Image (spheres, grey):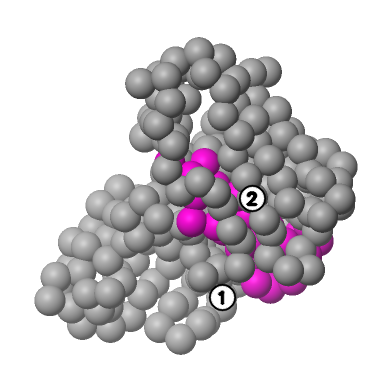
Amino acid sequence: DSGVTQTPKHLITATGQRVTLRCSPRSGDLSVYWYQQSLDQGLQFLIQYYNGEERAKGNILERFSAQQFPDLHSELNLSSLELGDSALYFCASSANPGQGEVGYTFGSGTRLTVV
Amino acid sequence: SQQGEEDPQALSIQEGENATMNCSYKTSINNLQWYRQNSGRGLVHLILIRSNEREKHSGRLRVTLDTSKKSSSLLITASRAADTASYFCATDAWGGKLIFGQGTELSVKP
């Protein structure tokens, strides 16, 4: 157990639907990052939050949005889902961006299948 | 888009042999990290090397970094079947936004 908790582990939904992925960071970590891993695009950075505020955006589609709540958990909302959104979605956390020798702690991911 | 390129894409060796994976990247970095992923599961951080470091060791892992060539290598010595996994390099340019390579799939046969 890495300390980063992602739910659900698996999600199957139909095209056009909306889903919410949840992430609880490791205790004490203020930064949360979302990544998407797909066969064709590999691991792509989506978005970062630090202590409740958006810090950086990557290749995140307009149909996707995220937020970090006061208790530091984060949710990634995916709407108008398409077949191509099927992927493994990872959350990672760190105490502060870019600090420390320990890298980033990743959760076990949510596997989203859009049918 | 991916910044890093890794080679080889796949590597198959026998237990006890050494495994070397290479990573190249395109822009300036703050640090470079290596992660392991077992069959579609979560990523596990292995080692981090800062841009002002040239070599780092951790157990059976040895990482080198050549910023002039924008390249890094990961050496796993005396490999074990349990080392079978995908290995990714990731560059951190400013603190948090990791740019991953495509990964090397390592298979260690008993």
Q: Which residues are magenta?
A: A89-111
Residue with the mark numbered 1: B55
Residue at coordinates 30% horizontally, 48% vertically from top-left?
B9
| Chain hosting mark 2 | A
Kindly indicate the quadrant of the structure image that contains residue A87: top left
* Above or below, A94 relative to A15: below
The x and y percentages for residue A57 are 73, 33
State the mark number for residue A23.
2
In the structure shown, which secondary structural element does the residue marked by tag 1 occupy?
Answer: strand
Amino acid type, label 1: Glu
Q: Does the residue at mark 1 contact the one at mark 2 (Cβ under 8 Å)?
A: no
Amino acid type, label 2: Cys
Residue at coordinates 68% horizontally, 47% vertically from top-left?
A33
In the figure, is residue B14 to the left or right of B21? left
* Above or below, B79 relative to A113: below
* Above or below, B13 relative to A57: below
- The Cα–Cα distance between marks 1 and 2, rounded to whole angstroms, is 34 Å
Residue B27 seen by the camera? no
| Chain hosting mark 1 | B
The x and y percentages for residue B25 are 55, 46
Kindly indicate the quadrant of the structure image that contains residue A14: top left
State the mark number for residue A55.
none
The x and y percentages for residue B48 are 60, 68
In the figure, is residue A111 to the left or right of B97? left
Which of B104/B72 is in front?
B104
Residue B60 seen by the camera? yes
In the structure shown, which secondary structural element does the residue marked by tag 2 occupy?
Answer: strand
Q: Nearer the viewer, mark 1 or mark 2?
A: 2
